[in-house]
Amino acid sequence: MKKLAIYSVLICSLFLVIFSSLTFGAMHIPFNEVVSILGKFFGAHYANVNTTYEGIIYIIRLPRLLLGLLVGAALGISGAAIQGIFRNPLAEPGLIGISAGASLMAVIVISFELSLLAGLSNLLGYYLLAFGAFVGAGIVAFLVYNISRTDGRANVATMLLAGIAINAFAGALTGLITYLADEQQLRTITFWMLGSLGGATWQTVWSVMPFIVIPLTILPLLGKSLNAFSLGETQANILGLRPNRVKTQVVILATLAVGASVAVSGIIGFVGLLVPHIIRLTGGVDHRFVLPASALMGALTLTLADVLARNLAAPIELPIGVITALLGSPVFLYILIREKRKLFN
Amino acid sequence: MLTATRLNYAIGKHCLLRDVSFQIQPGELLAILGANGAGKSTLINILSGEKKPSSGKVRLFDKELGDYLPHELARKRTILQQHNSVQLGFSVEEVLLMGRYPHFKHRPSKIDLVAVEEAMEICGVEHLAERSYPSLSGGEQQRVQYARILCQVWDQPESLLLMDEPVAALDPQYQQQTMAIAKAFSQRGFMVVAVLHEINLAAQYADRILMLKGGRKWLDGTPTEILTPAHIYSIFNTDVDVILNKQTLKPIVIPKQVNLAISSFNSLLPSIATCEKEVVT
């Protein structure tokens, strides 16, 4: 009942944010215009549509909105899933270096692509980028998991320290490549470090769609397995699951989503931490609920953050990573303080 | 029926189990006793399929343990372990429902929900149903875990119920209750195997006792056959008296008091009094 209420609140707010995202911006578009343009987009016949407004919505705001929804859902659900595998609410893709691994691979792909594979068509290039980011994210996830595991469960301190080390390593290499990069590459690389939805086009939306939609459909089905996982790997085994297979599935799907998100929008931190935490606080820890609800709320949060990023200092656009970090880091500190006794005993 | 044939288990050159063979029939409660390091936990983990024996076989009904699919085996055997941790704040009811996971795909059926309810009632944890598991005391957590593993095989008579030191963290009241529930399950047709430290609990509730020493099966028989002062001395190096409970005709084991001569605590270190004198001078 409570869960149903949370779902309905999330869906209603999502619609509100979607409309405000299309309405507000450097140019304000009246609400009734937005409705008629969307109506036309879905096939209804509206003769008197303002073509300037239509262009802004169709070419700029709609792909950006869709990308925000996809990336937000991806970050929310993969944060929740990775926390389930690590059995720890602090395991966030950004904090433990998964995003850094993805961005490092993305930067490597860019610098090679621009010099070697210039002939590749654009869409193929994007796929290559997303795949590279996925590989980077996956390597880091397996690495951190194995480093931090003692007696079959993740040790928090080791996990966070491994994350720091990997962030530093990836940062150093990314810095090195930045130092060697030419001006055009530099602009693309800087974009990765801050995180932005500014690069959204229909092409980027289509290119990440499969990498995010597949995890979004399969991960919620693994909720039961992740619940059993919180009893420990031995008990999960006794309950007839194959813990290693579950682990591999979740890590592949979650890193696929994170990798694809990083490839198109750079490192947007703290969404994967903030969102599942609020969901668990309000509706309980059952993964069968936390996973889909985190996807919804992730989409909501990122779209909202993007609306703020575009409008707070308009016409200047703030990097979206700044907004999510401002919202997320206090929550991170809060969890850390609340769980201090439990964590370091 | 469970048949263990010539089980061996070795880590490197350390042999933890040697040539252990035995059988359990449905309806039997078997207690495994033995001194520390005798191989009790190793044996029960092999019976659960968690550890693979270095050689030997465990046959459950018509198939060997290794030939079962994981979810198939999950409906036929369960194990209560000594250490259980739940990291996230699941409610007690949600933890119990996890015991039913082998029985449903995405939504629990009516049967699953009834099993959870009945198991909560039997174990006396229904008043904790809404509580968050990590907020419970150690003993309450243990009882919730017991209820969870009972859920797993609730409607599967003849399955295998394994328990590794089930009463370690419990008050006398719940020690008796835990064993009484295990006994009732064995009478319903389950095969129950419990590793116990408390000899008298085994004497009260077990149909059969298996004594391990140094990884070997030392003794196997009814409590009255096994629990004699000579046998207990050979396993635990402890002098005991065994008397018969005239009401239940079960043996009661009473350890004899151990007296140590105070002179054996004489020390070569200078006494505190002498030390102080030296500081003064």
Image (cartoon, coloured by chain):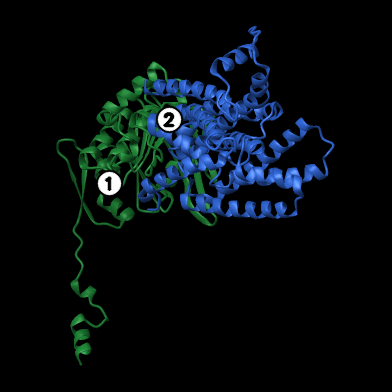
Chain colours: A blue, B green
Instruction: Specify the amino acid type for callout 2.
Output: Asp
Tell me if A1 is positioned left or right of A63 in this view: left
Residue A171: give x, y in percent of width and height.
63, 52
| Disc 2: CA contacts within 10 A as few (<14), some (14-19) or many (>=20) | some
Residue B49: give x, y in percent of width and height.
49, 38
**Residue at 46% across / 49% down in the picture?**
A156
Q: Identify whether B271 is placed above or below A295.
A: below
In which quadrant is the N terminus of chain A drawn?
A: top left
- Secondary structure of the residue carrying numbered label 1: loop
Tell me if A290 is positioned left or right of A256 in this view: left
Q: Chain of mark 1?
A: B
Q: Which residue is denoted by mark 1 in the rendering?
A: B198
* Residue A171 visible to the viewer: yes
* Residue B106 visible to the viewer: no
Residue A283: give x, y in percent of width and height.
39, 29
Instruction: Specify the amino acid type for callout 1.
Output: Glu
**Residue B249, quarter of picture:** top left
Q: Chain of mark 2?
A: A
- Let me know if marks 2 and 1 both belong to one chain: no
**Closer to the observer: label 2 or label 1?**
2
Towards the viewer: B237 or B192: B192
Q: Which residue is denoted by mark 2 in the rendering?
A: A286
Q: CA distance from mark 2 to mark 1?
A: 38 Å
Tell me if A80 is positioned left or right of A340 in this view: right
